[in-house]
Image: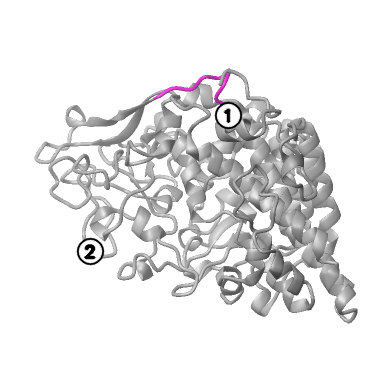
């Protein structure tokens, strides 16, 4: 059912109460004090207010984080993500202020909610304390979610747990990152038992106990607190509420919405709470505009069906490079035509996906800024049902899914040196999904070997879902992977014979990546914020 998301995204009077238009750091003054005088009277007020908080959660544009990784880029050199890829950014870039403001708007709204929600029971004692506690837990989850995001992006950030007036906000300072991790760990622990394991009917899509535990696992993984991460992930696994969806191919479609793999998503609905992901990211020959371009790096990462890297399997045929590969490759991105003899995917409108130069198709590279710059296009979340209504998408966007929990559990156990059969089982469960059916990983691997395995699985399983960006930064591997030209597809030009000597390697010359390890693992504190709040120290080398 998709009723809850409608409630979230219809404009509510509570949004006026919760979200301010002030331009200072923490949006300290409510934009509608008159509403506050008339609000917080009934359970309906409380429900509207907590529903409004869900609108702060990220949406399908989360995939764009992966444009700043080794597995994808953008089709437009004008995008600010390209400035970051090139290492040419500074604190004046508006994206950084958007990330900062977006996080603190949500946090300020959460604090305001928590300071006022108890007024409802004062006005109407018949409202259950249990329901008030649940609403508080949902809002505390959103606040903790954004503290995880902010500290991953900016490092030390102000930890604010109450609404501030303008003068107070001008004197805040940055708190140590470890204090942020302590705070979110405690928050998730305290709210988990106030949240139900599952919902039904119109409440499907709300924050659950499993979501709180999963976000704690993610936060503790990011913090390098392996034991806490593994314990939280194992609690999710032991809830008995989640399992992998049988078909990876359909996981990002209408068919799989609200399945048992989904722990938390951003609920959407055609006509009422729609998105334009198809219009923004589908191939141009489907009348889309390729907003995210997977790279050859990602394509090369998918193993052969024998479970081996393509460079280590003699059965791999470079003249038919997409055959006999991990099926997740073809479920994640549209496969381009390789040669006249090896056509690409047949698209929803019957056209063959052929982005090769001089192909004359809508997808031919380098014709305009709307087309892929690498030859690849995302397939996740591109659904045929939206072909004729491209800006009226209704597919929910997944924020947390069970496969991620299994991989977090495995990674945490590997990093803490507590390697047992459960680590192999978690990874192999994902590889053994019905329509993936990749070979189980070998037994008896070393910690270093298993670390490589789990990082590979995160790369190919979670590709183009917005998590790679944060993985590269916590692993401190971006300095090695985010440099040089961006590799595009291998192909044989039109009219050339299908032979090895004819293979050409496409590179996107519009962006040469650079990454300064002494600076770029963190974003700069936005320049405008430091003008408003001089006590905010800048990150190193900005």
Percent from the top left, x then y, of residue 113? 76, 61
Q: Quadrant of residue 258?
A: bottom right
Percent from the top left, x then y, of residue 404? 62, 49
Mark in front: 1 vs 2: 1
Q: Which residue is mark 1?
A: 524
Name the residue: 69% across, 69% down.
Answer: 35
Do the numbered discs 1 and 2 sit on residues whose CB atoms are within 8 Å? no
CA neighbours of label 1 inside 10 A, class few (<14), some (14 to 19), many (20+): many
Tell me: 81 left or right of 494. right
Question: Is residue 467 among what the camera can see?
Answer: no
Name the residue: 53% across, 47% down.
Answer: 461
Question: Is residue 131 among what the camera can see?
Answer: yes
Q: Is residue 329 above or below residue 417?
A: below
Q: Quadrant of residue 331?
A: bottom left
Percent from the top left, x then y, of residue 235? 79, 53
Name the residue: 22% across, 49% down.
Answer: 363
Q: Quadrant of the N terminus?
A: bottom right
Membership of 157 in magenta stretch: no
Q: What's drawn in magenta, residue-wise?
A: 513-520
Tell me: 148 left or right of 394. right
Count the labels in the image: 2
Q: Quadrant of the C terminus?
A: top right
Q: Which residue is mark 2?
A: 350
Q: Nearer the viewer, residue 343 or 100?
A: 100
CA neighbours of label 2 inside 10 A, class few (<14), some (14 to 19), many (20+): few
- Magenta: main secondary structure: loop
Percent from the top left, x then y, of residue 22? 61, 50
Q: Is residue 89 above or below residue 109?
A: above
Tell me: 151 left or right of 464. right
Marks 1 and 2 sit apart, C-alpha to C-alpha, by: 46 Å
- Mark number for residue 372? none
């Amino acid at each position: 059912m998709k009723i809850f998301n409608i409630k979230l995204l219809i404009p509510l009077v509570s949004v006026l109460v919760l979200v301010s238009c002030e331009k200072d750091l923490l949006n300290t003054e409510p934009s509608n004090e008159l509403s506050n005088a008339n609000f917080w009277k009934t359970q309906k007020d409380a429900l509207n207010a907590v529903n409004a908080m869900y609108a702060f959660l990220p949406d399908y544009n989360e995939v764009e984080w992966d444009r700043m990784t080794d597995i994808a880029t953008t089709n437009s050199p004008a995008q600010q993500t390209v400035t970051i890829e090139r290492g040419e950014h500074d604190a004046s870039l508006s994206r950084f202020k958007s990330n900062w403001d977006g996080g603190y708007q949500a946090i300020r709204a959460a604090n305001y909610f928590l300071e006022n929600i108890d007024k409802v029971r004062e006005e109407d004692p018949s409202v259950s304390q249990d329901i008030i506690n649940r609403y508080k837990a949902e809002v505390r989850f959103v606040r903790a979610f954004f503290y995880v995001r902010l500290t991953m992006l900016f490092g030390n950030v102000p930890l604010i747990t109450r609404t501030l007036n303008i003068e107070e906000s001008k004197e805040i300072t940055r708190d140590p990152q470890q204090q942020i991790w302590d705070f979110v760990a405690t928050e998730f622990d305290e709210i988990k038992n106030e949240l139900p394991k599952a919902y039904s009917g119109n409440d499907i899509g709300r924050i659950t106990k499993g979501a709180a535990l999963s976000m704690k696992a993610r936060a503790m993984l990011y913090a390098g607190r392996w034991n806490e991460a593994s314990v939280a992930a194992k609690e999710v696994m032991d809830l008995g509420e989640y399992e992998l969806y049988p078909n990876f191919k359909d996981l990002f479609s209408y068919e799989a919405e609200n399945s048992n793999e989904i722990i938390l998503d951003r609920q959407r609905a055609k006509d009422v709470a729609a998105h334009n992901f198809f219009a923004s990211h589908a191939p141009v020959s489907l009348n889309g505009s390729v907003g995210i371009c997977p790279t050859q790096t990602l394509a090369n990462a998918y193993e052969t069906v024998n479970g081996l890297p393509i460079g280590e399997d003699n059965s791999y045929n470079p003249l038919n490079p997409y055959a006999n590969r991990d099926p997740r490759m073809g479920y994640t991105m549209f496969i381009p035509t390789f040669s006249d003899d090896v056509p690409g995917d047949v698209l929803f409108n019957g056209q063959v996906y052929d982005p090769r130069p001089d192909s004359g198709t809508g997808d031919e590279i380098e014709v305009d800024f709307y087309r892929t710059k690498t030859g690849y296009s995302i397939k996740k979340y591109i659904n045929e049902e939206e072909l004729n209504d491209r800006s009226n998408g209704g597919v929910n966007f997944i924020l947390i899914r069970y496969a991620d929990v299994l991989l977090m559990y495995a990674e945490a156990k590997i990093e803490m040196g507590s390697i047992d059969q459960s680590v192999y089982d978690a990874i192999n469960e994902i590889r053994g999904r019905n329509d993936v059916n990749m070979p189980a990983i070998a037994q008896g691997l070393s910690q270093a070997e298993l670390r490589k395995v789990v990082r590979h699985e995160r790369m190919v399983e979670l590709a183009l879902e917005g998590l790679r960006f944060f993985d590269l930064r916590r692993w401190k591997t971006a300095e090695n992977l985010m440099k040089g030209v961006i590799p595009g597809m291998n192909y044989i030009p039109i009219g050339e014979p299908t032979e090895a000597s004819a293979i050409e390697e496409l590179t996107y010359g519009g962006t040469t990546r650079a990454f300064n390890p002494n600076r770029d693992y963190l974003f700069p504190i936005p320049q405008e914020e430091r003008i408003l709040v001089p006590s905010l120290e800048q990150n190193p080398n900005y």
